[in-house]
Amino acid sequence: MKLATLPVAVRHVPILANPASLSALLPRYYVTQTNPNKSTPPTSKRRAVTPFNDDGRVNWADLSAGEKAARATQQTFNFGFILAGLGLTGAVVYLLFTEVFSPDSRVANFSRAVDLIKKDPACQAALGDPKKILAHGEETYNRWKRSRPIASTIAQDRYGVEHLKMHFYLEGPLNQGVAHLHMTRHPKQGDGDFEYRYLFVDVKGHQRIYVINNEEEKNASGAPGRKTRFLGINWG
C-alpha cells in the first residue's frame, strides 16, 4: 500500500538583522531602586523676622514671641517717625506764617515801611525816582539783594510791650540811605497789631528824614501829666 503525499507549504519568516528593531517590538519594563535609609528632603525654613527685615508677609499668629516683639518695635519706630515728620512740617508752616504770610510778620512790616518811604516826598527828593528805589538787608557775599537778611529784633519790656526794631538799606538813583523802624505792640490791644513809633531815613549829606515820628507826640502828650515820685508818694 502506497501512502499519498500531501504538499506542505513552508513559510519563510524574515530574520531581523537589526537588534534595535527587535527591541522595538518587545515590551519595556523599568525598575527603579529606592533607598529606604534616605529620607525626603525637608521643606525650606523661613527667615527669622527682625525689626530690619520684616515686610509683613508672615502672619501674626505664625510669629514667635521674639518676632512679635521685633514687629512691634518696628511699627512703633515707624509711627514715631511719622509723628516727627508731622511735627517738623507743622513747625515749618508756623514759621512761614509768622515770618512771611502773617500781616504782622517782619516781612510784611518791611514791605509796608518801604512803600511809605517811596511815597514820602522828602525821600524822593533825596533818593530819586521811587520806582527805582531798592531796599535790602545786610550786606553779604552773595550779590543777590533778595538773599540779604533784614536786621530786626523783637524784645519785650517789663510792662509786656513788644518792641520791633528794624533797619535796612536803600539804594536810589541819586543817593543811598539807611532806614530805621521802631514799632510797638501793647498786650492789651485787641487786634494785636504793631503801631509805629518812628520811621526815619538817614542819607549822607541830608538831614534825617522822618517819615513817621510818634515819639515826639507821645512825649509831648505825656509831659504835662508827668508825675514826680518822692518818699513813695506820686506828687503832681
Image (cartoon, rainbow, N blue to C red):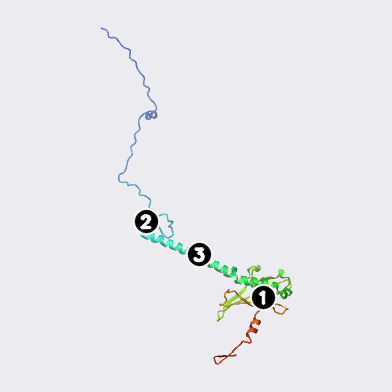
User: Does 30 sit above or below residue 141?
Assistant: above
| Labels 2 and 3: the sequence-earlier one | 2
Q: Secondary structure at mark 2?
A: helix
| Residue 208, picture quadrant | bottom right
Real-space CA distance between mark 1 and mark 2, rounded to the nearest whole angstrom: 72 Å
Q: Position of residue 71 (x, y in %)?
A: 41, 60
- Residue behind mark 1: 179
Q: CA distance from mark 3 to mark 1?
A: 39 Å
Inspect this view and state whether residue 68 appears.
yes
Residue plotted at (55% across, 66% down): 93
The residue shown at (36%, 60%) is: 65
Quarter containing the N terminus: top left
Element assignment for label 1: strand
According to the picture, the residue beneath numbered tag 2 turns out to be 61
Q: Residues within 10 Å of mark 1 (few under 14, many from 20)?
A: many
Per the rendering, the mark at residue 62 is none
Residue visible at 39% across and 61% down in the picture: 69
Q: Residues within 10 Å of mark 3 (few under 14, many from 20)?
A: few
Q: Give the distance between the C-alpha atoms of the residues marked 2 and 3, in whole angstroms.
A: 32 Å
Residue type beneath disc 1: Ala
Image marks 1 and 2: residues in contact by CB distance under 8 Å: no
Q: Which mark's residue is nearer the viewer, 2 or 3?
A: 3
Which residue, given by chain and number where applicable, does mark 3 sit on?
86
> Which quadrant of the figure contains the C terminus?
bottom right
The image position of residue 52, as x and y in percent, is 44, 59
Image quadrant where residue 221 sits: bottom right
